């Protein structure tokens, strides 16, 4: 990190910046006119210091005038903390209790357990960072992470491309989490078309529904990727 500092000092003087008593940058104060007042003898200075490693620093400034007089060092009011480390990459997952699909790992669900319209997700991120949740490129929520949170989201029916990223106090932004594809399906499938006995299972006259195969195979048309159940009712009366 190469932070920049500025301030007011005697016009045309030299200015030196120290970090933990080590000289890290120097420059020259601008003319008397630079601060907007050409009668006060002061000018604006700005110094970008050499790269500083992560850590805490006491920043001090001293001024040397044209006659060679050196001022006492003046300290920056607060300790400067350099933090150039990105937060850990967040993770997201729909909690199993809210995943009503064929598997509690498929992120396909028909409703939240309490019918509130809120779906709960486990979100992990670096504690204390600000986490934003995106649906596609749109931010839909934000919160401060405790490290691992169960966080509710209001989602409409359809497919949502969810992700999370976090920002720490120094402004470092994490890599975006792996995209989580969540499908909210509130609509029951339409009734399937009548099942048809496959020709390979029809040992009698074609189409008569009579076969000697005790494990016949059927085909039909229904909602894509849906789970199909075949129910056989014994209609014989004796």
Image (tube, helix red, strand yellow):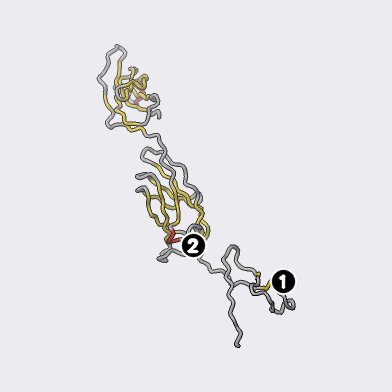
Residue assigned mark 1: 199
Compared across the picture, whether 7 is left or right of 236 comes to left
Is any atom of residue 89 visible in this view?
yes
Give SS at disc 1: helix
The total number of labels drawn is 2
User: Residue 1 lies in what quarter of the image?
Assistant: top left
Q: Quadrant of the C terminus?
A: bottom right
Query: Residue at left 35%, top 45%?
Result: 127
The picture places residue 17, in percent across and down from the top left corner, at: 33, 22
Looking at this view, name the residue that lies furthest to the bottom.
238
Looking at this view, name the residue that lies furthest to the right.
205
Is any atom of residue 38 visible in this view?
no
Q: Nearer the viewer, residue 99 or 157?
A: 99
Dot 2: within a 10 Å radius of its alpha carbon, few (fewer than 14), some, or many (20 or more) residues? many
The picture places residue 41, in percent across and down from the top left corner, at: 30, 20
Q: Nearer the viewer, residue 82 or 109?
A: 109
User: Residue 205 lies in what quarter of the image?
Assistant: bottom right
Q: Which numbered tag is attached to residue 109?
A: 2
Placement of 187 over or under 1, stated as above or below: below
């Amino acid at each position: 990190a190469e932070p920049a500092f500025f301030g007011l000092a005697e016009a045309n003087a030299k200015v030196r910046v120290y970090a933990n008593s080590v000289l890290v940058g120097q420059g020259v104060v601008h003319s008397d006119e630079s601060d907007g007042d050409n009668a006060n003898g002061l000018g604006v200075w700005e110094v970008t210091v050499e790269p500083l490693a992560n850590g805490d620093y006491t920043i001090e400034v001293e001024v040397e005038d044209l006659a060679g007089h050196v001022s006492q060092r003046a300290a920056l009011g607060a300790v400067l903390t350099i933090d150039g480390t990105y937060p850990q990459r967040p993770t997201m997952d729909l909690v199993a209790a809210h995943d009503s699909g064929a598997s509690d790992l498929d992120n396909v669900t028909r409703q939240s357990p309490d019918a509130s319209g809120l779906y709960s997700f486990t979100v992990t991120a670096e504690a204390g960072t600000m986490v934003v949740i995106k649906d596609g490129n749109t931010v839909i929520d934000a919160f401060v992470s405790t490290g691992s949170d169960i966080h509710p989201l209001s989602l409409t029916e359809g497919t949502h491309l969810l992700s999370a990223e976090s920002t720490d106090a120094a402004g470092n932004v994490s890599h975006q989490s792996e995209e989580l594809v969540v499908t909210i399906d509130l609509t029951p499938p339409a009734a399937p078309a009548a099942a048809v006995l496959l020709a390979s299972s029809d040992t009698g006259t074609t189409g008569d529904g009579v076969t000697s195969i005790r494990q016949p195979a059927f085909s039909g048309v229904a909602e894509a990727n849906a789970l199909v159940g075949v129910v056989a009712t014994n209609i014989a009366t004796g």
